Image: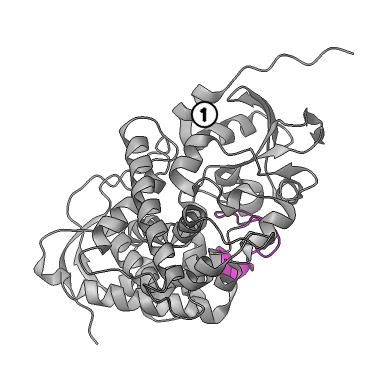
Amino acid sequence: MDAPRPLVDRSLPMLAEGYAWLPNRMRESANQVVRTRVMGRPTLAVRGPEAVRFFYDEQHVRRHGAMPGPVLSTLFGHGAVHTYDGDAHRARKELFLPLLHVDRIAGVVEHVTAAWDDAVSAWPGRSRVVLQDEAAVVLTRGVCRWAGIPLGDDEAEPLARDLIAMVDGFATLGPRHWRARRARQRQEARLSRLVEKVRSGAVPAPADSVLDRVSRHRHPGGELLEPRTAAVELLNVIRPTAAISWFVAFAAHALHRWPANRERLCGGDPTYAAAFTHEVRRFYPFAPFLGGRAVTDLSWRGESVPAGGMVLLDVYGQNHDEKLWGDPYAFRPQRFLECPVQRDELIPQGGGDPGAGHRCPGEGMTIGLLEALTTRLARLEYEVPEQDLTISLRRIPARPRSGFVIGDVRSPEA
């Protein structure tokens, strides 16, 4: 039997090709699995609903030790819930499970839409509105009010800039990355002080708010979370919410390119708003892939990876897999009216069970907020001036290059 060929490290092509890197490799595979090497480690990349279940089985793949330090120092934070597995992960995730509840989602939607309506009332007097930037501030104001985090009127924009910087710089080198690190350090220090003040009684936290829950949460051994760790988990609520500004900009991009969707959204049909939201999350690039470490020697569809090697789930590729979607590069919300969403097929924010596994517990919040904001956006009258609306798949995270600029805004009728 021939020995396996040595694997060539593909880290540089991964950085250069961005979202296309794994889909390009998958096209060379007959069975939707790729064996390669990334960051010096043997790596197995997988795709498809069965692969999602394989990836999220903790007997196969775990997150602990899988995330590179630069990602923890920018996007998630050291000691975050994402870095745990098993009982420790489930215990920490108790902080976030209320985000799954319908009443909690309704609450954050109410706060964010109120912040949106306040912001939009001032846009008619402005010659230029960068929608992604404005949406980030709106989302930051709304989620902080909902979470019980005190935020002065002049603090929302600086906080939003820092939250967006953490997302924008996690997968790159150079200025964006260092801006993300500084933003995280600044906000972890600020929220650590807030947690200490809540615990001392100097700052009241609304009962059962996110701030209250995080400040009172304890390790399985009974000790309170360290203030810095508590700050990390507060950021893991408000940072992903601010990041929905990417999807708001993508929704505006879709309404501009395919304006027929606007009329149906304006009609207030919640079923169509849900379908449009799912298609925005499927069609536009957000997470390129997710990674974990092999618990033991693993094999998937004839390809293997040793214990300690990397396993990657091809998120962007799966959301654009013609075997699942038929015409994956057509923007067609109707597909979600014709067929209900399947949990392990549509995975823009991961797969698996959000209650027991690593799937984002805030996914329901993302969907609820997008449904509300895209409906409001569709009803808003504005012009789209000449600008660069290209979305480079080499940039992670991708975004409309201009941030989607609108002008001549006319407030919707009451």
* Position of 195 relative to 392 (above/below): below
Judged left or right of residue 35, residue 226 is left
Judged left or right of residue 208, residue 262 is left
Residue 408 lies, in percent from the top left, at 13, 66
Query: For the point 77% across and 28% down, which residue is it?
Result: 306
At label 1, which amino acid type do we have? Answer: Met
Q: Which residues are magenta?
A: 335-358
Label 1 sits on a secondary structure element that is: helix
Judged left or right of residue 176, residue 315 is right
Query: For the point 58% across and 77% down, which residue is it?
Result: 101
Query: For the point 45% across and 27% down, which residue is it?
Result: 16
Residue 332 lies, in percent from the top left, at 49, 60
Q: Residue furthest bottom?
A: 414
Q: Is residue 1 visible?
A: yes
Residue 336 lies, in percent from the top left, at 57, 66
**Image quadrant containing the C terminus:** bottom left
Would you say residue 43 sits in the magenta stretch? no
Judged left or right of residue 208, residue 300 is right
Here the colouring is one colour
Classify 10 Å Cα crowding around label 1: few (below 14), some (14-19), many (20 and above): some
Along the line of sight, the residue nearer the viewer: 136 or 221: 221
Q: Which residue is mark 1?
A: 14
Along the line of sight, the residue nearer the viewer: 1 or 333: 1
* Position of 121 relative to 344 (above/below): below
Residue 380 lies, in percent from the top left, at 26, 73
The quarter of the picture where residue 259 lies is bottom left
Q: Residue furthest front?
A: 200
**Image quadrant containing the N terminus:** top right
Q: Residue furthest top?
A: 2
Q: Magenta region, mostly helix, strand or loop?
A: loop
Along the line of sight, the residue nearer the viewer: 240 or 95: 95
Q: Is residue 243 visible?
A: no
